Amino acid sequence: MAQSNVTISGNWFMGYESNKTSGTPGNGTVNRIQDQSSAIIFNGVEDLGGGLKAWFQLDTRFGPDQGNANGWSSGNTGVGFMGNWGKITLGRWDLHYSEFAGGLGAPRARSLASLLGHGIMSEVNGQGIAARTRATNVLKYDTPNWNGINGTLAYSTNPFGAEGPQNANGSKGNAWTGALRYVNGPWNAGLSYWHYNQEGGNGATNAATSVTSGATTLGSINAFTGTTGDQRSTRLWGSYTFAMGLRVGLGWDSSKYDADATAGTNMVKRNAWMLPVSYSWGPHAVYFQYARAGKTSGAANNSATGGRAYMLGYDYAMSKRTTLGAYYTKVNNSSRGTYDLFATAVPTNNGDDSRQFYLGLAHLF
């Protein structure tokens, strides 16, 4: 502590949510007070001289709704070096799936389910892409900002958990991702690509077990479903903020995964797009988001496998750090669609629809 500059920050996202999913016993209804990934973050920097600095971040997600810790260092956590040339990170970090929230914006007092970029836009008919949570075993480089342009290049030996056994070629698989962003005045745009090859040996099984158990420890986030076969994903986004407080954006995502984790030949693909619109004046802000996923291709039966979602919301900033909000989010599936609300951890059968009403409080410190 004496040799480093250490800061403590974080956030509280808490609220009342009413969730309902059709087609499940009792129509899948649950009302609860729920944490929405609250965090306490420790940052430290040590000046090594010559423009080189060592740094660390320890990001812990906790559950204030039930008073239990959800895993020490379960958030964006890493250590590395930084300078005028950029930043190197070794650790665990959000990659690819979270780019829409950063590039297209997110409600200030939101629930996790209201983030359509994490939900329907990060699935291929129920199959989560990039696990929809932080990748593990990450080596990451972030560029400096060049007149509004910045980029990220990252590699992971296994983004979904521990490596497979050494005697079964457990390190056969890996993932890499690259993102390029442009933020300048009213403009915000970017491109991100995700490339994952499944683990060798029992790595696929280990990955599924690790991430599924992590779904519980990270606030009941349904982070990864389906097979652990190869994945490819490209997402593109852009938004413009007008002087009167109106922000309009557009996001596009093309993703596919291998439905047969052993063959590597059955890639199921879908294209999706989302339209986020927000308007803010004074402490007030209103939100509308619409997303649509097309039917899949490459599977044995691709008919009626699409889905659509929308979110309506309003929040009020009581101060720079405290915001109250109300949001309604709905997912409608085609007869063979299995898209869900992100982080609700409710299994979705073919054609089930889901909705959430949320009243929330956000406090930043």
Image: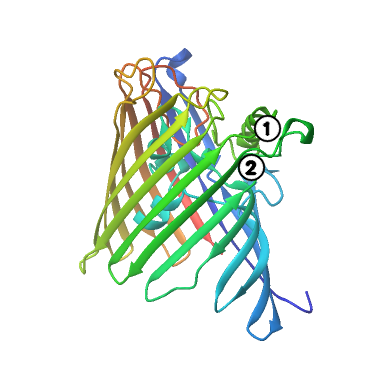
Q: In percent of the image, x 35 and y 39: which residue is there?
A: 254
Quadrant position of the C terminus in the picture: bottom right
Q: Position of residue 324 (x, y in %)?
A: 42, 53
Is 187 placed left or right of 83 in the picture?
A: left
Q: Position of residue 151 (x, y in %)?
A: 46, 63
Circles 1 and 2 in contact, beta carbons < 8 Å: yes
Above/below status of 68 relative to 302: below
Q: Is residue 149 visible?
A: yes
In the drawing, what numbered circle is on residue 203?
1
Q: Foreground residue, 21 or 117?
A: 117
In the picture of the structure, the residue carrying the numbered disc 2 is 158
Chain-order first, disc 1 or disc 2: 2
Q: Position of residue 269 (x, y in %)?
A: 37, 30
Above/below status of 192 relative to 269: below
Q: Is residue 310 visible?
A: no
The image's colouring method is: rainbow
Above/below status of 306 relative to 232: above
Total marks shown come to: 2
In the rendered structure, which amino acid carries the disc numbered 2? Answer: Asn
Q: In percent of the image, x 32 and y 36: which residue is there?
A: 271
Secondary structure under badge 2? loop
Task: Residue 311: name its quadrant.
Answer: top left
Q: In percent of the image, x 32 and y 62: which residue is there?
A: 188
Badge 1 local density, few (<14 within 10 Å), some, or many (20+)? many
In the rendered structure, which amino acid carries the disc numbered 1? Answer: Gly
